[in-house]
Image (cartoon, grey):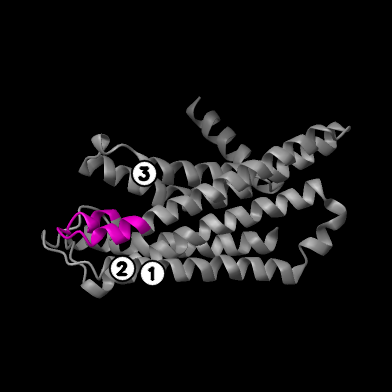
Amino acid sequence: MYFFLLNLSVLDLSYISTTVPKSMASSLWDNRDISYSGCAAQVFLFSFLLVTECCLLTVMAYDRYVAICRPLHYGTLLGSRACVHMTAAAWSSAFINALLHTANTFSIPLCKGNAVHQFFCEIPQILKLSCSHSYLREVGLLGVCVSLASGCFVFIVLSYVQIFRAVLRIPSEQGRHKAFSMCLPHLAVVSLFLSTVMICYLKPSSFSSPSLDMLLAVLYSEVPSILNPLIYSMRNQELKDALKKLIQSVVFQQQ
């Protein structure tokens, strides 16, 4: 679990570093220009990290399933070598996917200007600048990504159905509490990540507007990475006690 959390932490740090520094610099210096190569690099890194997180959360769901439903086989099914192989598969498949997306997106002729109405280079916004039918290739690739995300979602849901069935059969209340505390942080992170991505990419076109697209982009690109460390840290009793003391001190000061 801690090996996967290490990868998730590195992923979240890289994810938020892809868009936030450039966006902050643009706001501070009131210069929203980005070079063609810089935009391509941002598209590649964002696509790479987005797909990696989806794959990694799916692998973590399998880890929780084996730990709770098949605990006696955990060492066999999820030894250190298996964990490294699954994580490497998540990173490498996302790398190939991002490479295809980036190459395909920037091979499309753009003839509707060069202004991307977003705070970072996002593929759907770049496709709006194309007036060629060749953009349908990228739409097809986006459809493959949606199918991949749907497959990950279905796998995670099925894993948690089995997990909750197994947990409810645990006779002791302490055992059920321990199992739930092990799963709920991951389930919260998955729900936050997938719900924000699905809202952004599957919303009806009639609800699309520049301000709404901007808000949803912030929601799915920044909020999960900021909240993930906090969600997983809530399992730490010392952090809980410190947070409780902080809240109590603020309440007493106001009184």
Q: How many marks?
A: 3
> Where is mark 3, residue-wise?
200
Q: Quadrant of the N terminus?
A: bottom right
Foreground residue, 238 or 186?
186
Q: Which tag is nearer the camera, tag 3 or tag 2?
A: 2
Question: In this figure, which residue is indicated by the disc labeled 1?
Answer: 100
User: Tag 2: residue type?
Assistant: Asn
Can residue 96 be seen by looking at this rendering?
A: yes
Label 3 to label 2, Cα distance in Å? 21 Å
In terms of sequence position, does the residue under pointer 3 or pointer 2 come before the other? 2
115 over 242 or under it: above or below: below
Q: Real-space Cα distance between discs 2 and 1?
A: 6 Å
- Pointers 2 and 1 in contact (CB under 8 A)? yes
Q: Residues within 10 Å of mark 3 (few under 14, many from 20)?
A: many
User: Which of 46/240 is in front?
Assistant: 46
Q: In terms of image quadrants, where is residue 184?
A: top right
User: From what the image shows, is residue 212 above or below residue 73?
Assistant: above
Residue 182 disc label: none
Circle 3 SS class: helix
Callout 3, which amino acid? Cys
**What's the CA distance linking mark 3 and mark 1?**
22 Å
* Disc 2: which residue: 104
- Give the percent coordinates (x, y) of residue 40: 29, 70
Residue 19 in magenta stretch: no
Q: What is the magenta range?
A: 124-140
> Quarter-wise, where is residue 87 in the image?
bottom right
Callout 2: helix, strand or loop?
Answer: helix
**Which residue sits at x=73%, y=72%?**
81
In percent of width and height, residue 246 lies at 57, 40
Residue 123 drawn at (x, y percent): 30, 58
